[in-house]
Amino acid sequence: MVQVHYGMSKNKDASKKAQNDNARDNRKAAQKALHRQIESLPDPVALSQALMDAYQQSQPLFMDMLQKMGQTPPSAPDFANFDPDPMNVGGAAMNFMTSMSANPLKFWDMQMNYAQKQAQLWQNSIAKMLGQDSHPVIEPKQGDRRFRAESWNDSVFFDFIKQYYLLACDFVEQNIENNDDLSNSDKQKLKFTSKLMMDALSPSNFAMTNPEVIHETIESGGMNLVRGLQNMREDLERGHGQLKISTTDYSAFKLGENIATTPGHVVFENDLMQLIQYEPQSHGVFKRPLLVVPPWINKFYILDLRPESSFIRWAVEQGHTVFCISWVNPDAKLAQKDFDAYMFEGVLTAMDRIKDITGEPDCNAVGYCLGGTLLATTLAYLKAKKQDKRIASATFLTTLVDFAEAGDMKLFMDDEQIDEMIEMMSRTGVLKAEELQRTFSLLRANDLIWSFVVNNYLLGKEPFPFDLLYWNDDSTNMPAAMHSFYLRNMYRDNLLTRPGGIEIGDVKIDVSKVKTPAYFLSTKEDHIAPWKATYQTTQLMSGPKTFTLAASGHIAGVINPPSKEKYCFWSASKTPEKPDEWMKSAKETAGSWWPHWEEWIKHYANGQVEARQISHPIEPAPGRYVQVKSL
């Protein structure tokens, strides 16, 4: 008995010793983990010194900025025209608060769920700090590039800040999304404006909560902040007192030298446009010429960027005789140019000149974005005039004809905002380019605003030379009469979908009667012309139709040359009523959609003829009109 008892006691002591050893090892591991986390924090002494150095170095620069601002006093605030609620979101916010007060228990449940996630975040962060297994409570959404740096995940402190912020974003979004009393319009407005606010409050946008900025500040002795202030001063000067954030190295590009370089000449011009004919790149060309109708919200050379990504150059190389409209950048003198003028003096006049130059009675036409909307309008007009044979085929690139579900742009298009915009245009004669550019930037604020705030001003770096962003900043004005018509009749009232809803040149038009063979190209991640909205045009027009969906967005999905071997596209032989039904039957193909389109348009090329040389040039491409900058 004594031996048994002794053995049991010995085993118990051994077990207790093992437990103590385990506990001691765990404590040591936790201490080491905690020590590593503390070591990973920025050195407070070095950071303080760097900030002091940055302060001292920036004083002359700061005083110089103040002196220049003092030399040109700002104009008095225009309180008469100041709008504290430019997106007209006040009514939606009031409806939201009313719903909350009427159903407090539902929102209390969401608040409790939010509090539980916060508590879980605290627990997980403590566990991570002590070296224990820990899983994130919430992670950034796919495509969110703000938190790519390893420090956002490796450091428990910055990981906590990141997740705490993301939980707050999710809480705000869920409160709006789960409010059943709000109309869809109110929900979209609140989601958009709240996202703008939350994007602005991201910890990545502040020097002391962004680990990359802190690291750079210590490494450079604060010179990143000094360079950032210098960059800000240059952007203020570039914007004539308003902060116009640089998105690319503007000195890296020059029209006609390294972008918009496809050889050609202007062969016709009027007040509204120049018509460019491109030189052939082959001995034989397709008999039927190709007319490109670009949007006039930006400039045509989105289709003729660098040679390796130029759609126009590629089309010329395939054997097309390409003509392209280069729209004027209008000023107040052209305020009364309306939508009719863009058709009569733009597309139809270009077609007349193409007929004179080539001798061909018809052409194939490509319309991009707003240019595609104008092309659809032109087709309906020609059909009403029994001249629809003048366009043998039509290609629509990311084009809205049915504006019922026009995406986030609709948020800026209610009656009050349209009336305010029209009132503003009545004073200036145009919608200024900066207004449109600001709107498009807000649609992708993290990519087009805050990423550059961090890069340019906090990290003190120069933006990367990027041809697409150079083009994006080279925006144009819009004539008051044309833009008023476009906003009211298309975005707001969606009259282009109604038979006789729009009158052009005293002719009531009907898109549903258009029988011209059509190729539709949309992009899956388009935030300006959502693909399911653009798909609806296949149900409006009554001729042969081919719908293709490319990966990526409004620009990158379109400007995707085969040589890059990027992205993919989906295609199908039929166009059923619902876009989701089309998607189920669509076949995915790797790479660019351009060759797929080329195979389609060959059916309407009408054989081949000897290459056409340019006979009466006015000036070399890209011409004068595209060189005019918006002030």
Image (tube, rainbow, N blue to C red):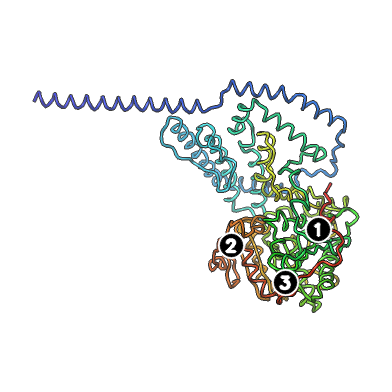
Residue located farthest toward the right when viewing the structure as drawn: 333
- Residue 569 is tagged as 2
CA gap, disc 2 to disc 3?
A: 30 Å
Q: Residues within 10 Å of mark 1 (few under 14, many from 20)?
A: many
Q: Earlier in the sequence, mark 3 or mark 1?
A: 3
User: Could you say whether the residue bearing mark 2 is in a helix, strand or loop?
Assistant: strand
* Count of numbered tags: 3
Instruction: Name the residue that disc number 3 marks.
Output: 284
Residue located farthest toward the bottom when viewing the structure as drawn: 386
Label 1 close to label 2 by CB (< 8 Å): no
User: Could you say whether the residue bearing mark 1 is in a helix, strand or loop?
Assistant: loop
Query: x, y (%) of residue 105?
Result: 54, 45
Query: x, y (%) of residue 413?
Result: 74, 55
Badge nearest the viewer, 2 or 3: 3
Using the image as rendered, state which of residue 587 and residue 405 is in the foreground: 587
Using the image as rendered, state which of residue 599 and residue 207 is in the foreground: 599
Type of amino acid at the residue the image marks with label 3: Gly
489 relative to 224 in the view: left or right:
right
Query: x, y (%) of residue 177?
Result: 59, 50
Label 3 close to label 1 by CB (< 8 Å): no
Q: Earlier in the sequence, mark 2 or mark 3?
A: 3
Instruction: Name the residue that disc number 1 marks.
Output: 621
User: Could you say whether the residue bearing mark 3 is in a helix, strand or loop?
Assistant: strand
Type of amino acid at the residue the image marks with label 1: Ala
Q: Residues within 10 Å of mark 2 (few under 14, many from 20)?
A: many
- Residue 197 is tagged as none
190 relative to 487 in the view: left or right:
left
596 relative to 323 in the view: left or right:
left
Residue in the image at 51% along x and 32% along y? 155
Quarter of image, res 372: bottom right
